[in-house]
Image (cartoon, grey):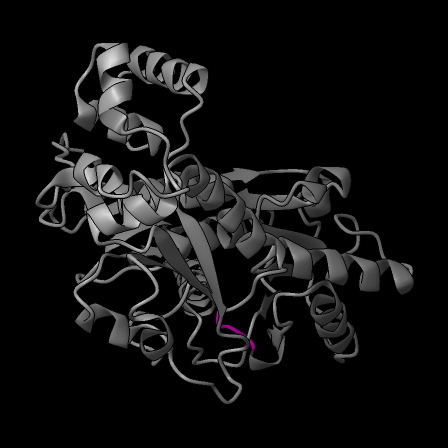
Amino acid sequence: MQAVTQTPYSPPGGLEHAVRGLEGTSLVAMTIRDIAREAGVSTATVSRALRGLPNVDPTTRHHVMKVAERMDYVISPTASRLATGRTQAIAVITPFISRWYFATVLSGAERVFHEADFDLLLFDTGEPSEPHRVPPHRRLRHKADGFLVLSLDPESQDVVGLFDLDLPVVLVGTTTRRAVTTMVDDVAGARMATQHLVDLGHRDIAIISGRVLPSPFTPDVDRYDGFLGALANAGITPDPDFLTFGSFTVRGGDQAMERLLALPRRPTAVFAISDEMAFGAMRAMRRHGLTPGRDISIVGYDGHELADLLDLTTVVQPVEELGVRGAQLMLERLLDPSLPVRQIIFPIELKVRGSTGPPLRRA
């Protein structure tokens, strides 16, 4: 990854000028020039340090913060926004907020934006298959400095209009040539999970996907493609009856497993494309007196913290780190919009546990 040279945005007059212009009001008691003089650094360094922006030596940042605290200085949000011409807000566009994956990505991103003194605007698009309200680009065009988009198809109506706003767009979990991306290779991850089942001797392998395909939700498509690719490499023809959908929820995984168990010929193994659906599938199996790993092997995907507790074999992806890096990339592009578009792919690993059991014994 090439090094990035960061140049902070500095409008005519700078932040110090805007803050000084508010002296005499109840908003500001002093200027950052006072802080800079006391700390022995430039006003630009004080500005970057107090707003949590990158490219400030940690020791210098700590020194500036201590001086500002001693002088009882608090940066004025109004002055900062006047000086930069920014809203100091990032819009996060996500299909869901409460589900584990999205909440975890959001947690990582929020920590970075909080340190940089940016607010978050959450835009929940909801279930992609349901009727949509006003697209995000029409609702948020004057309210945010950039857009962090989680796992949505970049060509969908919820995303495509963002690229015409001349503001930074960073994608998490999907990719396009028009935006910076932080992601994992979901095709490779699904192939890894399915190959593990094949290596254990399974040929009757079912998949619990998220939504009916084709889906506007990128992980559905990529993980299904990886599943089919592993079957094809093993010379296995997929059984249409072994394709079920669980909406990425525990309840959905439970219901999907019930459908599979009702088939005249049950699968011997299941790949659930999210851990939460795998949890539901395991619950359904136990309700029928079946033991995961002994009677039917099951693999999940995500690396949910409960996977270890439930002894679930899963493909582990660094979910929180995807959000952290996505937020950092957003800050980089705010500092220098001319940075080239790039794709950052994080490593994944298969964590084998008891839910896939020993190799299958055939009669």
Q: Is residue 325 above or below residue 213?
A: above
Q: Residue at the location (32% across, 28% down)?
A: 30
- Is 323 on the left-hand or right-hand side of 341? right
The front one of 314 and 166 is 166
| Magenta segment main secondary structure | loop
- Is 62 on the left-hand or right-hand side of 190? left
Q: Where is residue 254 in the image (x, y as percent from the top left)?
A: 76, 68
Corner quadrant of residue 345: top left
- Residue ranking furthest to the bottom: 131
- Is 75 on the left-hand or right-hand side of 114? left
Q: Position of residue 90 (x, y in %)?
A: 37, 55
Is any atom of residue 286 visible in this view? yes
Is any atom of residue 318 visible in this view? no
Q: Residue at the location (48% across, 38% down)?
A: 111
Q: Residue at the location (11% across, 48% down)?
A: 340
Q: Position of residue 140 (x, y in %)?
A: 35, 70
Residue interval drawn in magenta: 235-239
The front one of 34 and 50 is 34
